[in-house]
Image (spheres, grey):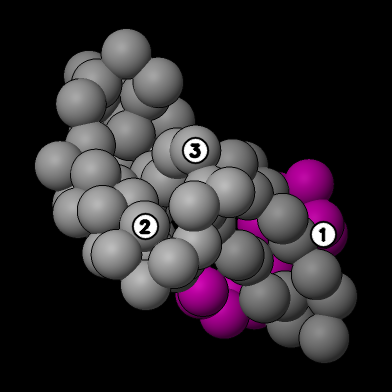
Amino acid sequence: MKNFTVKIEVKLKSVVLDPQGKAVLGALKNLGFDEVSDARVGKLIEIKISDESEDSARSKANEMCKKLLSNPVIEDYSLEVLEN
């Protein structure tokens, strides 16, 4: 068995309004960062997996995202698998 760290980034789809991102944008503008034109907020999930191969760990992480970690109706996700 090999140990892997999987980094999963989950973001709202671009067509979905992001009120938290709008709040961040407004706050940045109020702080004088006028050059910022947009902000979107997402989440980063890191999981540790022990598995036979990187491909198997990636496959299981994809399954986890589809079943629990993301909402496919309103969110997209990407993942990176790193061997420890």
Is disc 2 surrounded by few (<14), some (14 to 19) or many (20+) residues within 10 Å? some
Q: Nearer the viewer, residue 14 or 59?
A: 14
* Residue type, numbered disc 2: Lys
* Residue 19 seen anywhere in this rendered image of the structure: yes
- Write down the quadrant of residue 74 in the picture: top left
In percent of width and height, residue 76 lies at 43, 30
User: In this figure, which residue is indicated by the disc labeled 3?
Assistant: 37
User: In this figure, which residue is indicated by the disc labeled 1?
Assistant: 53
**Horizontal relation, residue 61 to residue 43: left or right:** right
Q: Secondary structure at mark 3?
A: loop
Closer to the chain start, of discs 2 and 3, is: 2
User: In this figure, which residue is indicated by the disc labeled 2?
Assistant: 29
The N terminus appears in which quarter of the rendering? Answer: bottom right
**Horizontal relation, residue 15 to residue 81: left or right:** left
| Residue 48 highlighted magenta (yes or no) | yes
User: Range of the magenta residues?
Assistant: 46-57
In percent of width and height, residue 40 lies at 39, 44
Identity of the residue drawn at 40% across and 21% down: 14
Q: Secondary structure at mark 1?
A: loop
Q: Are marks 2 and 3 in contact (CB under 8 Å)?
A: no
Q: Nearer the viewer, residue 78 or 16?
A: 16
Q: Secondary structure at mark 2?
A: helix
- Single out the mark in the foreground, 2 or 1: 2
Q: Nearer the viewer, residue 51 or 8?
A: 8
Residue farthest along the top direction in this orientation:
15
**Horizontal relation, residue 82 to residue 18: left or right:** right
* Residue type, numbered disc 1: Ser
In percent of width and height, residue 61 lies at 53, 51
Identity of the residue drawn at 24% across and 21% down: 16
